[in-house]
Image (cartoon, helix red, strand yellow):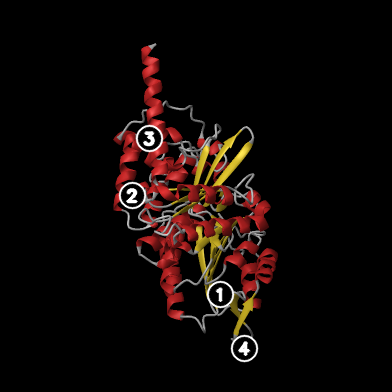
Amino acid sequence: MKKHVILFLAANPRTSNRRQLAEECADIQRELKMSPHRDDFQFESRWAVSVDELMRHLNELAPTVIHFSGRGGTAGLMLEDERGRPQPVSARALTMMVGTTARNARVVVLNACYTAAQADALRAKVDCVVGMVGAISDEAARAFAIRLYGALANCRSVGNAVDQGVAALAAKQLQEEQLPCCVTREGIDKYQVSLEARRAVNVREQSGATKPSRGASAPEAIAHGEESPLTARVKVLSPSILRPATRPKVADLPLGQFFVWWNDLTRGSITRFQRQLAQATREQDVQAFLEREPMMLVQHLGGGHGRWVIPRKRLGAEHVTDFMIGERDSAGWGWQAVELESPHARMFTKNGDPTAQLTHAIRQIEDWRDWLTRNASYAARDLGLTDVRPDLPGLVLIGRRANEDPATKNRLRQMMVQRRIQIHTYDFLLDNARGRIEFAIARRKRRRAR
């Protein structure tokens, strides 16, 4: 049976840290050998790669996965010329080279600095491309690669493999956790593509694949119609008092891995959020909590056909939103961009002027709108943001109500109307969650009274 060929290419090793590249290469090979599916993979490495050598290797080996490691930059990926000197290869040229030679390529990993532009170009020819939006250290590149291939070798989706790599960077407290990005060919979902049964397949096409492996990630479990570990845990701790909804199979929904059941809200969710707000020292702590319990973010939405929460949504190579939250009704989709600030920050100074934190939050949303003005069709078509508008509403969450001066209410209301951005303290989320619970209790009492 034909194996998946994983081709490791050392780009410009004479001016790169050869030892680090060798260690990265060995680590990837070791992860593949430790996998129970190791017989499905053939690992090949090539060093001191020039343009001609690269095309020769791609023709001869027909790899499923192409991994570039070494140097990158704004001018392009660095290969070598005939004299061993660095030769930048532009995104356009790299796309042409891969497109004309690597007929079996399904995944390309550009594990080098500033390769997001090359990744964006390559997705026209390859199902999934991983790049870096900034400069990445040798240590971080190696840590990311180890977990990426450890996941791929265990038949996890490409999207999940990238998430595991990012999680490893976060666990090791490496600042580059925001750098990896994964873009896909039009119509391809990175969470539905994996290396399996000696061929790259779409998970939905697998016959009999109705359930993920034990220990699958929450998004993958949901995509197969299972309850997520989070949902199961919340129900055990504090059974929802909201009326259970008729739940369609989430895999059949658009962006199924980000679908949120609003009625999974519990009193325990509110209590845990209050505790998190009291203990949080920075907005990243709140971000992590809301990623674990996204139902807290959707209680103010309508969306009779569903609600979605997408954390850390990338808009091109330039921007990463804290969240994109969406709702859908008979008229279509509606999206809202969310920017989080510290729960200890203030909205206004003692003089009644916006604080630096509030100004920064507003500027972030306006920058995202500017990007969408130029790329709205791409965002709707390729990023899954159906019907997204360049002037999409924004939501800024900052501080606590007790710290705000009531005299600034009129100023705040004026800013919200002028900029079309909702600006609230985190008590806004708590109020909506409590309101939902109280409504459910009242409805239950009315039914019992009948």
**Quick check: can you spot residue 39?**
no
Q: What residue is pinned by disc 4?
A: 83
Q: What residue is pinned by disc 2?
A: 277
Q: Residue furthest bottom?
A: 83
Please report whichever mark, 4 or 2, sits nearer to the chain's N-terminal start: 4
Residue 434, labelled with which disc? 3
- At label 4, the amino acid type is Arg
The local crowd at label 1, few if under 14, some if 14 to 19, many if 20 or more residues have their Cα within 10 Å, is many
Which quadrant of the structure image shows residue 280? bottom left
- At label 2, the amino acid type is Leu
Where is residue 27? Give x, y as percent: 41, 68
- At label 3, the amino acid type is Arg
Where is residue 376? Give x, y as percent: 66, 53
Q: What residue is pinned by disc 1?
A: 72
Where 237 sits versus 125, above or below?
A: above
SS at badge 2: helix
SS at badge 3: helix
* Quarter that holds the N terminus: bottom right
**Quick check: can you spot residue 251?**
yes
